[in-house]
Amino acid sequence: MFNRLIALLGGVILIFSFSRALIRALPGDPLETLIAESGTTLSIETLRADLGLDRPYFPALVQDLSLAFHGNLGRSLYNRQPIGPLLVTRLGRTAALVLTSLFLGIAISLVLGVFSAGLPGSWVDRFCSIYGSVTIAMPTPWLGPLLMLALSVWIPLFPIGGHLALPTLTLALVFSGFWARLIRERVRETLQTGSADAARARGVSEYKVLFKYGLGPAAGALLAYFGTQLGSLMAGAFVTETLFDWPGMGALLVDAVLRRDYPVVEAATFAAATLSLIFNQLGDLAQRYWDPRLRH
């Protein structure tokens, strides 16, 4: 556990180092480009100090890293507001989108995956295969406008933007397609072991066999994939937010890029990459907690 915490801390520091190096990697003088294209009224000395370009890279990195661990991620060049509280607000809205999509996606994938595993060759099994193939192949920037056209224009059930329903459905469909097929394969493998046959011989109902002797033993491997998929789900949320005008981290990052608000771009990139790294570690820890054989 201690080694994992050290590795996680090292990964966070590495991500922060790369995010702080973004501005220095731009060709030419980025401040002249920033002033010319953003129309900011800030002086070049103020910009240089805000971006840490008035100090050597490594001393500036150590100082900014210390400030970041205390919650100080600098100020926006656009409105001069602290970035930390802005990120917390936007992350809360992104978390709401990700969690609702996650619950809906898990519900769909569990129903399809478990029952198609228990009924091989049935219409449920065939539908799971088709559903998974179609949803995995559909990119979020294409599926989102399609749902918007179908459910906001042709059938006006939802407004076009500013709500959770359509972005949640978009992410849940893409997420559940992969997970339904993964759950089906894992549950089908565990159902072929002797414990499932022994349970049937004892007269255990097929419903209980599916969930206790099929899904239960497969849950450890599924949890490991779950951590990696959370990062992918958050990346998909960033794209979906811009499509449906949801004021989360994705919309913040796009606006910051268009405004050349480099401190916000750096902070948002750092936050997103760090969360993805944490989710991966949590997925691995959850798998080890679920399966005692992996603790050793």
Image (tube, rainbow, N blue to C red):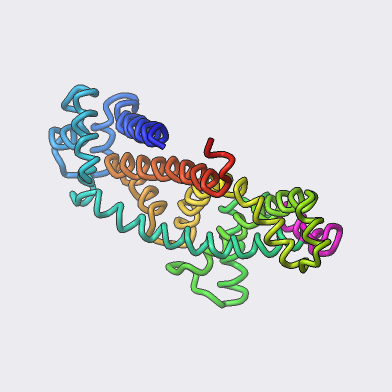
Classified by dominant secondary structure, the portion drawn in magenta counts as: helix
> Which corner quadrant holds the N terminus?
top left
- The vertical placement of 86 against 9, above or below, is below
Given residues 259 and 9, the one toward you in this image is 9
How many marks overall? 0
Q: Quadrant of residue 174?
A: bottom right
In percent of width and height, residue 155 lies at 61, 76
Q: Is residue 81 left or right of residue 15?
A: left
Looking at this rendering, what residue extends furthest in the front direction? Answer: 202
Q: Quadrant of residue 55?
A: top left
- At 39% from the left and 41% from the top, the residue drawn is 274
- The vertical placement of 272 against 157, above or below, is above
User: Magenta stretch containing residue 38, yes or no?
Assistant: no
In percent of width and height, residue 222 lies at 61, 49
- The vertical placement of 83 against 176, above or below, is above
Given residues 88 and 250, the one toward you in this image is 88
- The vertical placement of 112 against 54, above or below, is below
Residue 186 appears anywhere in the view: yes
Given residues 93 and 153, the one toward you in this image is 93
Q: Which residues are magenta?
A: 116-133
- At 54% from the left and 63% from the top, the residue drawn is 103
In percent of width and height, residue 200 lies at 81, 62
Q: Is residue 264 left or right of residue 81?
A: right
